[in-house]
Amino acid sequence: MLMSQPSARSLSPVFDADQRYPVDLHMHSTASDGALTPTELVTLCAERGLTHMSLTDHDTMDGIEEAARAAERVGICLIPGCELSTRWQGVSIHVVALMPGGLQGAMVEGLLQQREARIQRAEVIAERLEKVGLPNALEKARFHAGSDRPLGRPDFARALVEEGLVPDWASAFKRYLGSGKKGDVKAHWPEISEAVGWIVDSGGVAVIAHPLRHGLTRRKRGLLMDTFQAAGGQAVELVSGQQNPDSTRDLARQLVERNLYASMGSDFHFPGSHAAPGSMSLVPRTAAPPIWQHPRLVHLRDAPAGPLASV
Ligand code: AMP
Ligand code: MN
Ligand code: MN
Ligand code: MN
């Protein structure tokens, strides 16, 4: 009798109204611009009661091996992943790649290309910031990165704050690094369709990251989804961190109209920020299927039998 019942840790096949799920499929570690090592992140996720997680560092899967070892230890289901930087109609768009088979196929070459793009982009950002009063920008950003990983805009933000050009991190983005500012260099990223191709050809599922944070109108967001879908993309983050419930319901309608799967994640970067692993707005009742119903994500349907399974 007990055996035939679904496990208490298996996930619901449809979204019920205003439910919280023990799932977070968008988080960062020290392999990109996060503060926790992959091991620390996985441990924190388990402590917070998550059963399913993905590590999605910017343009790299370098943290996955360590995360997978930690996940095995604490008995949490880890979906390998990353967050690709791409371009669409002059806007920088992030695409989460959920890669149940790990790093393989076209993604191997794709991530090498992203790494190179990030290195070259950092040089352009540094040149531009030197012109506005940050000498030796590259060296300073490198110092703040604290490792030899390719640099990101947050590393330059820290340098700008440290050198007193701006009072805080938010101002660094507002004045120098945010969308449309001097340090917002996008030319190096691939077209969204190309990046989606890498993911799909490598056995993965492509997910539009934080669709409400790309600064698009509803109509443009729909056009983005159409292009994405035509390239083989099948999912969108219905919930990313904290969102307005009306916007979420409206977004859900755009997913349902296109038969897109719904994913969710906190976009967690560091403790003490507004986000924490598994902390995000509630999922509304919607006909959009949960991403763990996607045929390629069988791992997501049931939690692994690990130390926590018996708790
Ligand atoms: P990059 O991947 O190098 O383009 O840097 C993008 C990252 O910078 C994002 O993933 C965030 O972590 C951070 N970021 C972007 N915009 C802002 C902002 N307006 N305020 C704070 N952090 C931001
Ligand atoms: Mn980031
Ligand atoms: Mn992002
Ligand atoms: Mn992210």
Image (cartoon, grey):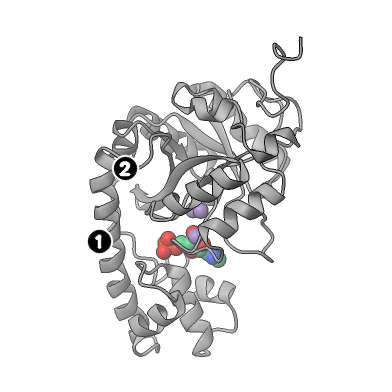
Spatial CA span between label 2 and label 1: 15 Å
Q: Earlier in the sequence, mark 2 or mark 1?
A: 1
- Residue drawn at (40%, 89%), measured in percent from left and top? 133
Q: Quadrant of the C terminus?
A: top right
Q: In terms of image quadrants, where is residue 237?
A: top right
Query: Could you say whether the residue bearing mark 2 is in a helix, strand or loop?
Result: helix
- Residue drawn at (31%, 42%), measured in percent from left and top? 195
Residue placed most toward the observer, 48 or 262: 48
* x, y percent for residue 106: 25, 39
Query: Could you say whether the residue bearing mark 1 is in a helix, strand or loop?
Result: helix
Answer whether residue 215 is visible to the viewer in this image. Answer: no
Numbered label attached to residue 195: 2
217 to 2, vertically: above or below:
below
Callout 1: few (<14), some (14-19), or many (20+) C-alpha neighbours within 10 Å? some
* x, y percent for residue 71: 55, 46
* Viewer-nearest of discs 2 and 1: 1
Residue placed most toward the observer, 263 or 12: 12
Q: In terms of image quadrants, where is residue 155?
A: bottom left
* 153 with respect to 20 (left or right): left
Callout 2: few (<14), some (14-19), or many (20+) C-alpha neighbours within 10 Å? many
- Residue drawn at (71%, 51%), measured in percent from left and top? 47
182 to 202, vertically: above or below:
below
Callout count: 2
* x, y percent for residue 235: 48, 32
* x, y percent for residue 238: 59, 37
Instruction: Answer whether labels 2 and 1 touch (C-beta < 8 Å).
Output: no
Q: Amino acid at mark 1?
A: Glu
Q: Which residue is mark 1?
A: 116
Q: Amino acid at mark 2?
A: Ala
* 53 with respect to 189 (left or right): right
193 to 130, vertically: above or below:
above
